[in-house]
């Protein structure tokens, strides 16, 4: 079975919000109608977004790190938002695992948004229906687009390649390999929602060096600068065996 | 969560309507075995059912204000297999229909006998069966309403059988209090019966509601900021929420009230729902004062509005972890 999803690499996300704006641009221009935007250039701007980037500061000054954290619908494999919907407007597609809302059926009761622990759904104040990320279902299958562009708008926009898109059920796909080899994880695993979207953690490359590895005991010329005094006088295996 | 007034009115109004119907049927079953005698029984049940129906209808109307697309509300009956909300949508009108039938049968005094029990004609057989159906639907409706909240497992304050028990007991209590006031006008000899039950159920509700308050005050939330963003560090501060003015996420899941207000609402509802009504009921019964009995119901109902507000405000949605700087 296919399960399309995003893998978001927190190691390289720079928090530029390119995914946010390109998502809004694509989805507000689609056949499903616009995504509202009230007071966009005024005080208290508010509107519907499928994707938002949040920023967190980890640690205490001066040892801090800023993590930018993009969040959209995670297309859970066991989505708690779907069974609670009274109308069947919220559903999970069999063929590719995308969780969608049928805007023509939704009565705007907001119950599904209560049932999503991630706050991934946003109620559109103009159209009065529930909206959320569609994984750009209207472009990923569009054969009029060149193959390389059949990806969600956010993935194409990301300048640092922090967003990867693919089938997480295919163990050979790029996204699966990244999840497996780079420590991909799910958000709030405690609720058993099995989010399909994964996040890759910050990764640092470190070598662990033990002190004795810094001293070349077997240096034949004994010219190393950093030689602990004690070691010089002691016999080494070289002294005994080099003849 | 943000307490929505449409839902507060829906749940409190139908609760009182359901309770009133249960009270009427209690009286009828007592009368059927000749525990009590009711003058003008048909009028008593018919007008009582009309009041119950009016409350249910008012609740239904209130619920429509919650919907973004009320004109599509009929669609919400579709997913009864999985959704408690859908089940409630089906059971509420079914219950209203039965209350209507029950009231109409009594109003027109059409109450044919169905079964002859050992040649001792029990009166009102058919309406008793309709009443039993109504009672079953009434409890189903209570369970549906409660389960809408109790089934959301990560809203840990709600995810407990106590939520359902509270809905049953609080609704029934207000219905019986209303029945006490109603009978003071229509059938004064029932005031004692209803009043006693109203006090007993109110005290039972006090126990179960206090139990849930106690449970919620010691609740350990399973999710943390660490599990929400998957970063293991004890010191994480949110610097940006991904929005400037506010969004659905900052509006729908917060009560936006000061913690002092939250605390005072708790004491206010404990007094208005439980303490005052019991005092007013006993005073009203002792002094044979209809006004006091009506006041008992009104005070309890207002208290229930506060109780419901608090019920929503106290629930802490895990998505709030992503919105720490609100
Ligand atoms: S992230 Fe929320 S809205 Fe998306 S599938 Fe999971 S529960 Fe549903
Ligand atoms: S808001 Fe729409 S999609 Fe969500 S539960 Fe209600 S009807 Fe279903």
Image (cartoon, rainbow, N blue to C red):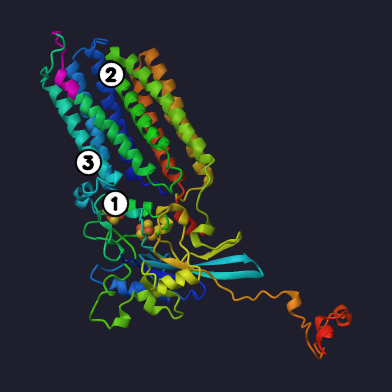
User: Residue at label 1?
Assistant: A85
Left or right? Give the position of B87 relative to B223. Answer: left
Tell which of B14 and B275 is nearer to you.
Answer: B14
User: Residue at label 2?
Assistant: B183
Q: Secondary structure at mark 1?
A: loop
Question: Does B86 sit above or below residue A58?
Answer: above
Is there a contact, CB below 8 Å, between mark 1 and mark 3?
no
Tell which of B29 and B175 is nearer to you.
Answer: B29
**Which chain does the residue under circle 3 lie in?**
B
- From the image, which quarter does the N terminus of chain A lie in? bottom left
**Which chain does the residue under circle 1 lie in?**
A
Q: Secondary structure at mark 3?
A: helix
Query: What is the crowding at mark 1: few (fewer than 14 residues within 10 Å), some, or many (at least 20)?
Result: many
| Residue ID at (24%, 67%) | A32
Tell which of B202 and B122 is nearer to you.
Answer: B122
User: Residue at label 3?
Assistant: B90
| Residue ID at (36%, 65%) | A47
Q: Which residues are magenta?
A: B119-129
Q: Position of residue B318 (x, y in %)?
A: 46, 53
Query: What is the crowding at mark 2: few (fewer than 14 residues within 10 Å), some, or many (at least 20)?
Result: many
Q: Secondary structure at mark 2?
A: helix
Left or right? Give the position of A12 relative to A58. Answer: left
Q: Position of residue A214 (x, y in %)?
A: 75, 80
């Amino acid at each position: 079975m296919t399960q399309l999803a995003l893998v978001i690499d927190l190691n390289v996300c720079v928090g530029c919000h390119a995914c946010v704006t390109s998502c809004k641009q694509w989805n507000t221009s689609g056949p499903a109608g616009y995504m509202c935007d009230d007071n966009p250039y005024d005080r208290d701007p508010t509107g519907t977004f499928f994707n938002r980037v949040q920023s967190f500061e980890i640690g205490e000054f001066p040892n801090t790190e800023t993590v930018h954290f993009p969040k959209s619908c995670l297309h859970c494999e066991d989505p708690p938002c779907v069974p609670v919907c009274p109308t069947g407007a919220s559903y999970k597609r069999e063929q590719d695992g995308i969780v969608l809302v049928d805007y023509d059926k939704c009565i705007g009761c907001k119950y599904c948004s209560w049932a999503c622990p991630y706050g991934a759904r946003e109620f559109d104040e103009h159209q009065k229906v529930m909206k959320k990320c569609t994984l750009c279902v209207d472009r990923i299958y569009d054969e009029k687009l060149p193959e390389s562009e059949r990806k969600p708008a956010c993935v194409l926009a990301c300048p640092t390649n922090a967003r990867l898109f693919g089938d997480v059920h295919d163990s050979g796909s790029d996204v699966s390999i990244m999840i497996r080899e780079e420590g991909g994880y799910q958000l709030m695993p405690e609720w058993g929602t099995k989010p399909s979207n994964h996040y890759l953690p910050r990764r640092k490359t470190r070598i662990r060096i033990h002190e004795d590895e810094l001293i070349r005991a077997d240096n034949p010329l004994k010219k190393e600068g950093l030689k602990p005094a004690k070691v010089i006088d002691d016999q080494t295996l070289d002294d005994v065996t080099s003849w | 969560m943000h307490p929505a007034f449409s839902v507060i009115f829906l749940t409190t109004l139908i609760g009182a309507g359901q309770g009133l119907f249960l009270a009427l049927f209690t009286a009828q079953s007592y009368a059927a075995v000749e525990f009590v005698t009711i003058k003008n029984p048909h009028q008593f049940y018919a007008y009582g059912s009309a009041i119950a129906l009016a409350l249910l209808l008012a609740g239904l109307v209130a619920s429509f204000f919650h919907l973004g697309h009320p004109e599509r509300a009929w669609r919400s009956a579709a997913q009864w297999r999985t959704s408690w909300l859908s089940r409630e949508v089906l059971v509420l009108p079914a219950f209203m229909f039965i209350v209507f039938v029950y009231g109409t049968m009594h109003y027109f005094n059409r109450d044919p006998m169905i079964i002859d029990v050992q040649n001792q004609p029990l009166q009102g057989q058919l309406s008793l069966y309709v009443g039993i159906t109504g009672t079953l639907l009434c409890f189903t409706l209570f369970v549906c309403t409660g389960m809408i909240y109790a089934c959301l497992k990560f809203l840990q304050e709600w995810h407990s059988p106590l939520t359902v028990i509270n809905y049953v007991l609080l609704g029934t209590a207000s219905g019986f209090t209303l029945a006490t006031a109603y009978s003071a006008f229509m059938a004064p000899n029932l005031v004692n019966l209803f009043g006693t039950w109203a006090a007993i159920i109110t005290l039972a509700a006090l126990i179960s509601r206090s139990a849930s308050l106690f449970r919620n005050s010691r609740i350990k939330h399973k999710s943390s900021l660490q599990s929400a963003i998957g970063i293991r560090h004890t010191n994480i501060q949110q610097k940006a929420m991904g929005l400037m003015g506010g969004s659905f996420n900052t509006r729908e899941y917060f009560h936006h009230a000061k913690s002092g207000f939250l605390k005072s609402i708790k004491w206010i509802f404990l007094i208005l729902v439980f303490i005052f009504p019991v005092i007013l009921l006993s005073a009203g019964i002792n002094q044979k004062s209809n006004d006091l009995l009506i006041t008992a119901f009104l005070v309890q109902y207002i208290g229930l509005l506060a109780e419901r507000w608090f019920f929503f405000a106290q629930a802490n949605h895990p998505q709030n972890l992503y919105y720490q700087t609100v």
